[in-house]
């Protein structure tokens, strides 16, 4: 498996609190790497360190050999890091189609940014609609993104990320707050897109994690305490104690 | 009536009134008001240009008087040199030709806009307000420190600029020139807003974090709209100096930047036509109230508070029944 993203010994402390300590992770193409752990374990902080939204106190991050450590968030995004947020971040006040257009214009269709009326750039509109079709959002194209259901917003956010052709996708609790059906659709969706990229999945939904993940890393108090295949993690006594709890682990 | 029809009707009526205003005023023997109408159009041009940066990009510039005044000073200084047969920087002769003065005023404001924009667009929110204010005040103090151009007294012009085929000294002709510029600028701004560039700017205003995470820092697009805004205000300044035949440091003063903000807020942030209505209501009230009492500032203040409280998205928004996004 080709390694895409490698983070070594990332550390971040806020005052005296070590939010993330000695965090190392490798993400390979075609692989879903789940990051689990109790609230406050440092999972979201770790994602923010990878994207550069927080600057690590120490440690290094490389994407296909390119050192990302000194790059800003948008430069890392251009290098191929896409992310979603724990609180879904789409542009609520714009239509679903406009959200999709912005995502396309952000990187892959940058040369289309100009003074032409946006609805007259036919190839761009077609491409945006194509994405919306794939993500089952086309009927909502003219609706405001803020009017979508939680599940639809989550799909839109991932569609927007994919429009930038990321090499690595960092997903911060994509299933949280979703209905059962939306959650199942998301699992199918992630399964479909994983072939062409590496995915880091922070998720509390254990059913989803054990269905999807090729590797599971468990965080507690800022540290990765175990990292292995789902089958082994399920049975790791340290993990069960820290997080899963005896009965849930088998479920 | 649908919202769109109502909007078209109001815009159509507005331009109809603006188009027939001078003959109308002369028919009722009130031609004096033509130059006041020109002044309103000039402030409207600033309002429209300022709304580009406030309404579209979500960045409040508290320094647009710098562009207004600079545009005015370029015209004033060129005219001053022309009238007194002095060389500018000991190199160029002055000119009174609008075809040279006005583009030059806009060009200088473009450069000033790039300088101020590059510095201030590194910040957002309150810091953007403060840094645009600070930079504009630097321009103000720079200009009043040049005694050659009147220092704090400003410069008087002998005559308005010359435009081949027209007589700008004629208030009616000058009014139509102002109206033409307002329309041209509206068309340019409209094109920008509905373009892909405009969409990116709007996206950055509404969710900056998302744009960054998508790998698209909005700086370049914001700079473009800031510079276009600066150019519009600079042109308005050039027109203002022609209208009053006087260029004063007041045109660069921060209090005028504040007045421009009031125009945008009154008219409606995020609506291009807001600037037009904002200028109309503010300058109209000033004109009417000051003819009745010396204490008109007090009444104007109360009137503004009432307007802002009753029409939260601005006057234009209330007229067309829309809310700003």
Image (tube, rainbow, N blue to C red):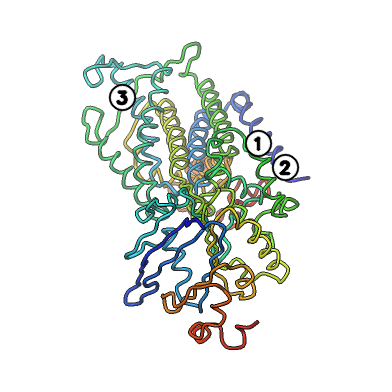
At a point 49% along the width and 33% down the height, the residue shown is: B42
Mark 3 packing: few (<14 Cα in 10 Å), some, or many (20+)? Answer: many
Where is residue A5? Give x, y as percent.
45, 58
Where is residue B307? Give x, y as percent.
57, 53
Task: Please tell me whether mark 1 sits on a helix, a strand or a loop.
Answer: helix
Q: Say which label, 3 or 2, has the lower sequence index.
A: 2
Quadrant assignment, res B240: top left
Q: Is residue A153 visible?
A: no
Cα separation between marks 3 and 1:
50 Å
Q: Nearer the viewer, residue B137 or A18?
A: A18
Q: Chain of mark 3?
A: B
- Residue under label 3: B77
- Residue under label 1: A123
The disc label shown at residue B4, or none: 2
Of labels 1 and 2, the one closer to you: 1
* Quarter of the picture holding the C terminus of chain A: bottom right
- When the figure is inspected, residue B4 is found, relative to residue A176, above or below; the finding is above
- When the figure is inspected, residue A57 is found, relative to residue B94, above or below; the finding is below
Quadrant assignment, res A229: bottom right
């Amino acid at each position: 498996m080709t390694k895409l993203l490698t983070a070594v010994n990332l550390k971040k402390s806020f005052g005296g609190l070590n939010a993330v300590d000695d965090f190392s992770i490798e993400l390979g193409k075609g692989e879903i790497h789940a990051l689990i752990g109790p609230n406050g374990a440092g999972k979201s902080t770790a994602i923010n360190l990878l994207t550069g939204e927080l600057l690590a106190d120490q440690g290094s991050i490389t994407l296909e050999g390119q050192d990302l450590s000194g790059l800003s968030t948008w430069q890392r995004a251009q290098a191929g890091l896409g992310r979603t947020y724990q609180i879904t971040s789409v542009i609520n006040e714009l239509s679903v189609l406009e959200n999709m257009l912005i995502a396309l214009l952000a990187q892959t269709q940058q040369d289309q940014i100009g003074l032409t009326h946006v609805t007259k750039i036919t190839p761009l509109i077609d491409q945006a609609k194509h994405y919306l079709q794939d993500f089952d959002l086309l009927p909502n194209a003219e609706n405001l993104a803020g009017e979508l259901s939680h599940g639809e917003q989550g799909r839109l956010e991932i569609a927007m990320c994919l429009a930038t052709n990321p090499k690595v996708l960092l997903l911060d609790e994509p299933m949280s707050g979703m209905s059962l059906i939306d959650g199942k659709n998301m699992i199918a969706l992630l399964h479909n897109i994983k072939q062409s990229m590496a995915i880091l999945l922070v998720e509390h939904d254990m059913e989803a994690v054990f269905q999807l993940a090729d590797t599971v890393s468990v965080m507690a108090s800022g540290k990765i305490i175990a990292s292995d295949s789902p089958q082994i993690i399920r049975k790791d006594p340290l993990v069960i104690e820290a997080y899963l709890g005896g009965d849930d682990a088998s479920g | 009536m649908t919202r769109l029809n109502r909007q078209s009707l109001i815009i159509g009526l507005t331009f109809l009134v603006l188009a027939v205003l001078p003959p109308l005023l002369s028919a009722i023997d009130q031609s004096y008001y033509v130059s006041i109408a020109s002044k309103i159009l000039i402030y409207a041009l600033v309002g429209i240009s300022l709304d580009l940066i406030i309404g579209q990009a979500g960045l409040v510039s508290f320094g647009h008087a710098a562009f207004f005044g600079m545009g005015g000073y370029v015209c004033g200084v060129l005219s001053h040199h022309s009238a007194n047969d002095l060389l500018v920087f000991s190199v160029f002769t002055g000119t009174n030709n609008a075809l040279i003065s006005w583009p030059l005023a806009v060009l200088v404001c473009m450069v000033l806009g790039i300088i101020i924009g590059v510095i201030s667009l590194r910040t957002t929110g309150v810091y953007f307000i403060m840094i645009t204010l600070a930079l504009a005040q630097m321009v103000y103090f720079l200009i009043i420190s040049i005694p050659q151009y009147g220092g704090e007294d400003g410069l008087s012009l002998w005559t308005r600029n010359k435009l081949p085929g027209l007589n700008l000294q004629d208030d009616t002709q000058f009014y139509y020139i102002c109206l033409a510029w307002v329309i041209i600028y509206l068309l340019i701004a409209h094109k920008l807003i509905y373009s892909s560039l405009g969409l990116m700017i709007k996206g950055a205003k509404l969710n900056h974090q998302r744009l960054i995470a998508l790998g698209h820092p909005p700086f370049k697009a914001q700079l473009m709209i800031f510079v276009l805004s600066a150019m519009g205000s600079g042109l308005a300044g050039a027109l203002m100096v022609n209208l009053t035949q006087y260029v004063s440091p007041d045109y660069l003063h921060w209090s005028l930047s504040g007045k421009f903000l009031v125009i945008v807020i009154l008219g409606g942030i995020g609506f291009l036509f807001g600037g037009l209505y904002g200028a109309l209501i503010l300058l109209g009230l000033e004109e009417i109230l000051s003819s009745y009492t010396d204490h008109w500032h007090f009444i104007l203040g109360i009137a503004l508070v009432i307007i802002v409280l009753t029409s939260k998205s601005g006057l234009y928004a209330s007229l067309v029944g829309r809310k700003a996004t």
